């Protein structure tokens, strides 16, 4: 008997589930992976494009190029999900599953912050980051505000990286540079005091202004000021914002307080045979790809066990490793673990130039695993 496994979303979580479940050839699983995007882009690759290190085509991994014969990829918009019947409505028609995995991530809504679309740039979507590259290239220098507009948000270190890389990018071109970072957190990376201390030291060294425990609620494009949650204002010449995050509308019926609740150890939802991983959940870890990947590995193990009669004892350990760029080819690695009911803990390695190669290897390993091909992006302007 063939088990129909349908995976919604082809980010870190969806790609890992699809690859792991089909890693052993056989006719006992029919796996369909559905996503509306053209291809996959690492979060850190968006920054590479923003700051002129790579061209967009060098960091986009087209889904059409996947070589895993066990995965049927469908390019379609997901319009509705019925978790009780495990039926999915899409622009390519309906799909029915025996096991359903929701890995749709978070939708980003720049329109939710008044003035952001008219007066600033968001850099969290692929299109937004690529457009921000043009804005940075054309910017003549001045006051830059990097800010978060709501919580929760993906990849908590990314705004700090963006502030540091903006400073490096502008000063390397001899432009005047006054960077301010507005964050809702008390420290840049709360689970790791060492990482937070290193980031704050880097800010102090560069004169980057750190504004903690506040959000930007709106922009006034006419006056070029950002309106903060404490009713203060910040003037800007260039605004780079993290937009509002929401669960996709297609799974709104599965959410509680905005996100899909899951068992933090098994990633099972309240619906039998339905799992959810990554940013769309309220699992309790940061919304970041490495955590989605770890959750996906557990889900894949449990699917394989249920299909092939093996043990399905895999449990998520809450661990994730992320890279943090400081500029000047200096990269740090933060190893963090989140366990339900316990205070998260994290350690810092680096920063160093050696870890830049480690980060490159991290990306190359996953493209090799998920897409079956080598990836070694050249710097922008290099011969291809």
Image (cartoon, rainbow, N blue to C red):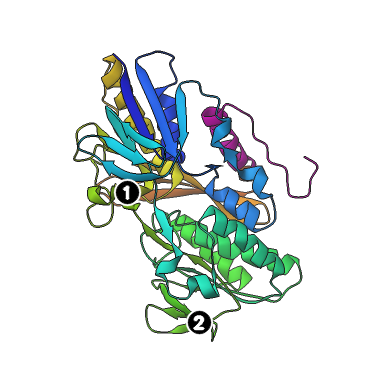
Q: Is residue 309 magenta?
A: no
Q: Foreground: 34 or 269?
A: 34
x, y percent for residue 248 = 35, 52
Q: Residues within 10 Å of mark 2 (few under 14, many from 20)?
A: some
- In the rendered image, which residue does mark 2 sit on? 234
Q: Is residue 347 left or right of residue 55?
A: left
Residue extent of the magenta highlight = 356-384
Q: Is residue 368 magenta?
A: yes
x, y percent for residue 99 = 28, 29
Mark 2 vs 1, N-terminal side: 2
What secondary structure is found at the residue carrying circle 1? helix
Q: Foreground: 183 or 226?
A: 226
- The residue lying at 45 percent from left, 53 percent from top is 155
Q: Are marks 2 and 1 in contact (CB under 8 Å)?
A: no
- The residue lying at 61 percent from left, 61 percent from top is 131
x, y percent for residue 361 = 60, 36
- In the rendered image, which residue does mark 1 sit on? 250
Identify the disc placed on residue 15.
Answer: none
Q: Is residue 72 left or right of residue 82?
A: right
x, y percent for residue 306 = 26, 21
Q: Residues within 10 Å of mark 1 (few under 14, many from 20)?
A: some
What secondary structure is found at the residue carrying circle 2? strand
């Amino acid at each position: 008997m063939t088990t129909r496994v349908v995976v919604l979303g082809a980010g870190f979580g969806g790609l890992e589930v699809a690859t792991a479940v089909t890693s052993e050839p056989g006719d006992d699983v029919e796996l369909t992976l559905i996503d509306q995007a053209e291809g996959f882009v690492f979060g850190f690759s968006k920054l590479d494009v923003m700051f002129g290190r790579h061209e967009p085509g060098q960091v986009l991994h087209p889904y059409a190029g996947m070589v895993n014969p066990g995965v049927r990829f469908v390019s379609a918009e997901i319009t509705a999900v019925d978790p009780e019947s495990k039926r999915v409505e899409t622009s390519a028609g309906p799909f029915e599953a025996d096991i359903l995995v929701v890995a749709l991530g978070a939708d980003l809504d720049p329109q939710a912050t008044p003035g952001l679309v008219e007066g600033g740039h968001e850099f969290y979507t692929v299109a937004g980051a690529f457009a921000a590259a043009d804005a940075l290239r054309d910017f003549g220098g001045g006051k830059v505000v990097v800010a978060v507009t709501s919580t929760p948000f993906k990849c908590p270190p990314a705004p700090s990286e963006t502030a540091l890389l903006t400073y490096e990018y502008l000063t390397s071109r001899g432009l005047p540079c006054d960077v301010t970072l507005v964050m809702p957190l008390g420290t840049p990376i709360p689970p790791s005091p060492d990482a937070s201390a290193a980031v704050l030291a880097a800010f102090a060294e560069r004169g980057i202004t750190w504004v903690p425990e506040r959000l930007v609620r709106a922009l006034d494009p006419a006056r070029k000021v950002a309106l903060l949650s404490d009713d203060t204002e910040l003037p800007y010449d260039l605004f780079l914002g993290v937009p509002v995050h929401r669960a996709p509308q297609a799974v709104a019926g599965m959410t509680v307080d905005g996100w899909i609740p899951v068992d933090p150890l098994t990633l099972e939802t309240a619906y039998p045979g339905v799992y959810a991983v990554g940013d769309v959940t309220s699992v309790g870890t940061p919304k970041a790809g490495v955590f989605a990947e770890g959750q996906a590995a557990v889900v894949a193990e449990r699917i394989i066990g249920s299909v092939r009669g093996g043990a399905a004892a895999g449990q998520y350990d809450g661990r994730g490793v992320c890279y943090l760029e400081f500029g000047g080819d200096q990269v740090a690695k933060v190893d963090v673990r989140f366990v339900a009911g316990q205070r998260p803990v994290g350690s810092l390695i680096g920063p160093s130039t050696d870890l830049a190669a480690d980060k490159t290897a991290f990306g190359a390993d996953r493209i090799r695993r998920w897409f079956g091909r080598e990836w070694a992006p050249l710097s922008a302007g290099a011969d291809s």
